[in-house]
């Protein structure tokens, strides 16, 4: 066998191994925690959180608000509503973050933005009963997610979106 053919074979093998190393080195995952805003005052318009909602917002802060813990939240996205911003406020305060206000009903662009701007990071997204399933669907491609009922405030989705491969999620109650 000619020596040049052996060298060419070795280069092909080394290129393939280099590609595998690159895939492993860049295959970090983005973790997105998606929740509905906490309990709100009854009324129309843009109501604030009630006392139960404030307690739930504080629970989120206890869960995700330690800036010195490994794997802490890197960014927070909220809708323009007062209740969404109030839900994220205790976490943001503990972490020293300013929540990013994003349109409430544009799940596809929000998902793209989170994955593009925070690749490999951890993001909290505070949405609404009708937007949370759409956000999770946009992040994962999942179909048939159950709706969030009007009186349901404790649903949390934890989405893991790898750079290479398919995103997946957990649905929890907190």
Image (spheres, rainbow, N blue to C red):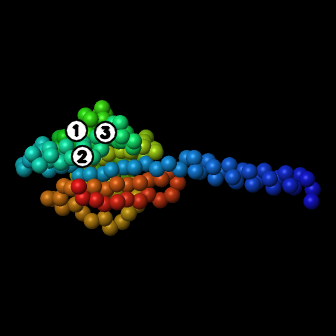
**Residue 90 badge:** 1
Q: Which quadrant, please, contains the N terminus? A: bottom right
- Residue 162, image x, y percentages: 48, 53
Q: Mark 2 sits on what residue?
A: 60
**Residue 66 badge:** 3
Q: Quadrant of residue 118?
A: top left
Gap in angstroms between the C-alphas marked 1 and 2: 8 Å
Which structural element holds mark 2?
helix
Q: Which mark is in front, 3 or 2?
A: 3
- Residue 94, image x, y percentages: 27, 35
Does residue 94 lie above or below 149 as drawn? above
Which structural element holds mark 1?
helix
Residue at left 27%, top 55%?
Answer: 156
Gap in angstroms between the C-alphas marked 3 and 2: 11 Å
Gap in angstroms between the C-alphas marked 1 and 3: 11 Å
Q: Is residue 47 left or right of residue 111?
A: left
Q: Quadrant of residue 157?
A: bottom left
């Amino acid at each position: 066998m000619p020596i040049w053919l052996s060298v060419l074979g070795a280069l092909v093998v080394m290129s393939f191994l280099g590609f595998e190393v690159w895939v492993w080195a860049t295959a970090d995952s983005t973790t997105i925690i998606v929740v509905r805003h906490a309990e709100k005052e009854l009324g129309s318009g843009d109501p604030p959180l009630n006392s139960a909602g404030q307690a739930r917002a504080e629970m989120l802060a206890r869960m995700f608000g330690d800036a010195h813990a490994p794997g802490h939240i890197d960014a927070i996205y909220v809708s323009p509503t007062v209740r969404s911003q109030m839900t994220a406020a205790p976490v943001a305060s503990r972490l020293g973050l300013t929540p990013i206000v994003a349109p409430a009903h544009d799940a596809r662009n929000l998902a793209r933005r989170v994955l593009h701007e925070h690749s490999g990071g951890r993001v909290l997204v505070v949405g609404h009963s009708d937007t949370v399933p759409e956000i999770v669907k946009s992040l994962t491609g999942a179909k048939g997610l159950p709706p969030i009922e009007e009186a349901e405030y404790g649903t949390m989705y934890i989405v893991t979106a790898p750079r290479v491969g398919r995103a997946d999620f957990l649905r929890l109650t907190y």
